[in-house]
Structures are given as C-alpha cells and as structure tokens.
Amino acid sequence: MLIMETLSKIRRLYYVEKKGFKTIARELRLSKNTVKKVIRENKTIPRYHRSEQPYRVLEKYVEGLRSRLAFDQEEPRRRRRTAMKLYLELCEEGYTGSYVSVNNFVKHWKLECGQNVSKVYVPLEFAPGEAFQFDWSEEEIALAGKLTRIKVAHIRLSHSRFFLTVAYPNEQLEMVLEAHDEAFLFFGGVCRKGIYDNMKTAVQKVLVGKDRIFNRRFLELASHYLFEPIACTPAAGWEKGQVENQVSTSRCRFFTPLCHVDSLDELNEHLKERCVQWAKNQPHPEQKDKSVWEVYQAEKPHLLPYRDAFNVCKLVSTRVSSYSLVNFDTNAYSVDCCYVGKAVELRIYAKRIVIYYGEKEIGSHIRHFGRHQRIYDPWHYVPVLERKPGALRNGAPFKDFKLPKSTMKVQTALANYSDGDKQFIKLLLQVKKIGLASLEKACTWALAQGSCQADMILDHIKNPKQKTLSPDPLSDRLKLVAIPDANCKAYDTLFLSQTLRNIDAQKREALL
C-alpha cells in the first residue's frame, strides 16, 4: 500500500514538473501501472479496503458463533444475544481473543444478513443522588416448566448506573409501589427526583408542557419517600435513555437464554445477586478507572435516607355479596360471613389481598392472577353451619377443609352417629374462642380415652386437668346385685324335665 509521501511525490512530479509515467516510475522505483493508477484515480489520501477479515484466534469458534447467531435470528428480538453475551459464552469455552474480534464478526454477519446494526444514544449527566429512572419491560421465562410472559420493573440510579430489576405478573399500580419500596431498600436510600414515562399507573392526565396530574396513591408514595416525580415528554424516550438502554442490557445478561425458575420469588432473589455482580464487574462509562459498584458506594452518602416502608397497596372499595364474597379483577375472595352486605375496603398488594371493615381485618388471601376463580377460607363460613349443618358435607368452602390430624379422626368417628355433623359443628364453633391448637389437643385426649363425644371434649377443654373419663351415674344403677353361678347342671335338669313333659303329652294324645 502506498503511503501519503509517495502519493504526494507522484502528483508533484506529474502536475508540477510535467514528467511522464516512465520517468516517474524510474525515479521512484515504482511500477508504471501504479503511477498511472494514482494519477487517473486522482487520489490524495491512501485508502485500503480489506477484502476478507482474518480471524486467527477466533477461527476455530467461528462455526459455533455462526450457529448461535442463526439460532438467535429465529428467536424473538427480546431473546437474541448481543455480541457481549456471545463473547462471554465463548470465553467459558476457552476463547482467549478480544471482544473486538467477536463484535466485528457479529457486525459483518448481520450486514450479510441485511440486519441494521446501528444504534444512537444521547448521553445524559446527573449529579450524585440527583435522580433515578424507572421503566417496565416484558420478558419471557420458563416458570415451573411453562413458558410465561412477565413484567420486569427497572429502577436505575442515574449517576452511578447501579440498577435493580424486579419481576411481577403484571404492571398494575400495586406492583409499581412495591417495586419502588424494594429498590429504595436495596439501594439504601432515595434520589431527589424520579424520571418516568407517561405510564397510566402513575400519570392520570398529560397537560401542556411538563405539567401532569399524577395518581393520588403514587403521589402518596412520592411524598412518603420525599422525591419529586418527573414525567418525560411523550414519545421522547431519550430523556430517560439510561433505563431504556438497561432494558436491553438486563435482557441480554439475565434473561437469555431462557431462564428456568420455580417461582417469581426465586427469580427476584437471583436478579438481585446478578445486579450486584454486574455492578462489580462493569466499568463505569464515564469514570473509566472505577466500576459501577465503586461509583455507587461514593454516591450512596448523597442519597436521602430510607424511611419506614410505605404501605404499598392499592385501595378499592366494594360490598360483600350474599355469598360472603368480594370481587376483584374477575376473581372472588371470601370474608367473614358476619359482614354480608357491608361496605368494605380491599387493600391490594402485589402478592396478597387483605379486606378491612373500618380498621378491622375481616379477610386475607394470597392473590390469584387467573380469571373467574373463587378463593375460600372455610373458617369464614363456620358460623353459618350452626343454622345450616348440611353445608358441612356439600358446601364449596369445605371441600378442601384442612384440619389437624386428631380433629379429622374425630370428624370421621362422629360420622357414624345420626347427629355427628351437629356435634362436630359444635366443636368447630369453639375454635374462634379457644383456638385450633386447643381443640386439636382435646381431640387427641378424647381419642386416647376411646371416645369422641362433643360434650366430653368440650368438658375437657373447660377442665383440662381431668385425665380420665368421668363415671357415668347411670352405670351404678345397672350393676348386678347377685352374680349368677355358672353351673351347667341347672340346664341339664331343666332339659330333662322338659323332655319328660313332652313324653307325657305324647302318651295322652295316643290314648285319646
């Protein structure tokens, strides 16, 4: 390849000194064709285009890299691996080359396949503790062996770039509230501003300019933690470009290839560990000599202190139906039957639902995310059994009524009595006063005595020092006064006399 000085000499000799191609070639010891090419192409800067890129260290990994890229091309975009992810996988297989070679190979491969590989980002700069950014993404995981789409909350400190990702079944308001509480506890503090897009769970109405009407419950969260919520301009994601970029980063590092977990709690614990690991190994994009973790440790004193946990629930008012159920999100949850027809308040958390009448809790359930389900607590319906004992056998709330072992044995034994259901219901009605543990202890005692009568069990609960069955007063009157003599001769005498009487009767009939 010709250098810049040689090009300059050729051009001066030809244009200034008016020398011919042969003369220039002889003086500079070049080929005449080379001199002609320089003059005819009118080049002032030497350029070289490599026809083929050699990959000496990467060569034996090329086929595996091509197969990975071909596999990812068939996957949805969210599950495709980036060049960095592919580089890390090759390093685990023994690759000792540089990331640049892998990145160049991926770029050339994508260009050959007609894919656009260019991305543009707007750099942002924030002071320590100034702001955090929040966003949602949709990911796919194998949850208990089933392919499931989940929502992932991303909270990122804008100065240090330290972030947390939290997975939820959806992105409703209660999930937003809990994600903030989880993040502030994880970071050990709160920034002075929070930057959001115009998500409906936080922004009720977009006004002119930067003015917004925020959700009241969301404002309570901001007031509790003392940060100012700021919504981006519509369709201007670059205003929170860091967290937008984080979505692709976490998808690449944490969710590709497909993540297999048994529960979301397990996934979230895994994500916390991966976030810390990433921060400790990732150089800060601006402070090159430090990791993200080190910059976060320097930023931490600038954060507002973490206050007491916010009550991260959504409040919904409703009325208890005649079946002692309250409805939320197509599902029905049971409450204490004493509050049928009453106006109650539902406190909707990310993982559970609690029902209050005034300040009194009248029901609590694990939250279900299916549709058109009924979730019962059998104890809510026990008071009804006093008036409707038949419901114990066929009532839907009692189909899977789980009771302690001895109590179940007493129920089975009482089933043999005509009034067995009523007796067992009498025991269940006492649980609210004495507790299930006390009933189980009394049932264990009754089974050891060989009896399961409800009155006897209740007597023992009132007088637990009683160790044996109390004597039955009727049994004294039924005792034998004279014990019979076990003498078989009396039977023989009776049999002989009866036989003689039969013979005499036969003789009399014959004479007649």
Image (tube, grey):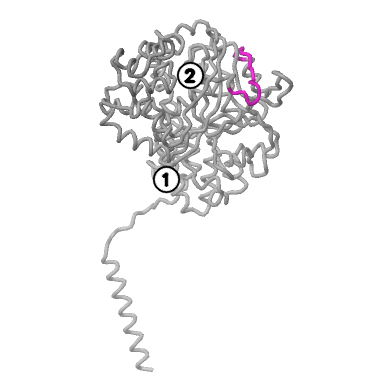
- Boundaries of the magenta span: 224-237
Badge 1: how crowded within 10 Å, few (<14), some, or many (20+)? some
In the rendered structure, which amino acid carries the disc numbered 1?
Lys
**Residue 97 place in picture, x, y as percent:** 29, 22
Which SS class for mark 2?
Answer: strand
Q: Amino acid at mark 2?
A: Phe
| Residue under the image location 51 percent in, 42 percent down | 455
Measured Cα–Cα span from mark 1 to mark 2 = 54 Å
- Can the viewer see residue 152 in this picture? yes
Residue 409's label in the rendered image is 1
Instruction: State which mark lies toward you, 1 or 2.
Output: 2
Q: Report whether 211 appears left or right of 197.
A: right
Picture disc at residue 385: none
Please tell me which residue lies in front, 41 or 79. Answer: 41
Look at the image and say whether residue 250 sits in the magenta stretch: no
- Rendered location of residue 486, percent (x, y): 28, 59
Q: Which mark is residue 163?
A: 2
Q: Percent position (x, y) of residue 417?
A: 49, 53
- Quadrant, the C terminus: bottom left
Element under disc 1: helix
Q: Position of residue 157 (x, y in %)?
A: 51, 15
10 Å crowding of disc 2: few (<14), some (14-19), many (20+): many
Q: In the rendered image, which quarter is residue 483 located in?
A: bottom left
Is any atom of residue 261 visible in this view? no
**Numbered circles on residues, count:** 2
In the image shown, does 210 or 490 lie closer to the viewer? 210
- Left/right placement of residue 462 relative to residue 13 reads right
Q: Nearer the viewer, residue 127 or 179?
A: 127
N-term mark: 1 or 2: 2
Q: Nearer the viewer, residue 29 or 380?
A: 29
